[in-house]
Image (tube, grey):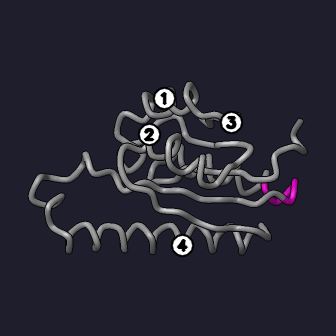
Amino acid sequence: MEDDFKKILVGVDDSEDALLAFRYAMKRARATNAELIIVSVLESNEMSVYQALSKDYIHGEREDLEKHILKYQKLAQDAGVKKVRSIVAEGNAGEAIVKDVIPHVQPDLLIIGSYSKKGLARHFGSQAAYMAKYAPVSVLVIR
């Protein structure tokens, strides 16, 4: 079964659990020569109305997130993962990953952390549960 995972999608943010998930996903991708796709979500529900209406604010936040995710991409490449790419999605983390990213990327496996303070939501337990329930692919929740 493990060899069937040719494309691994991993959700990242700044939490410890997300870093654990990322490290595990890197090792697994390297060991099975799978493609690693790193996703982070710009969550509009964490912005004030003023910030959400400001194109400059959104652009700045998105740019910061894109720079941040490129660091993850470089870490994976430096660790020996041959095929790596990254994606920034917008919206509610669980829904964005399940409804937008997965159909677009078509991974075989989604790896996520079980809890998070921000980014992939402060109440990531519920986000993780949402993704585990509704994702059309296998989901591995790392603790």
Which tag, 3 or 1, sits closer to the chain's start? Answer: 1
Amino acid type of disc 2?
A: Glu
Quadrant of res 61? bottom left
| Residue occupying the point 62% across, 37% down | 142
Relative height, residue 106 to residue 50 (above, below): above
Please indicate whether residue 124 sits to the left or right of residue 36 in the image: left
Q: Nearer the viewer, residue 41 or 76?
A: 41
Look at the image and tell me in which quarter the C terminus lies.
top right
How packed is label 2: few (under 14 Cα within 10 Å), some, or many (20 or more)? some
Label of residue 130 in the image = 1
Query: Which residue does the numbered mark 4 point to in the structure image?
Result: 70
Magenta: main secondary structure: helix
Which residue matches tag 2? Answer: 95
Picture disc at residue 137: 3
Q: Amino acid at mark 3?
A: Val
User: In whole angstroms, how far apart are the C-alphas of marks 4 and 1?
Assistant: 26 Å
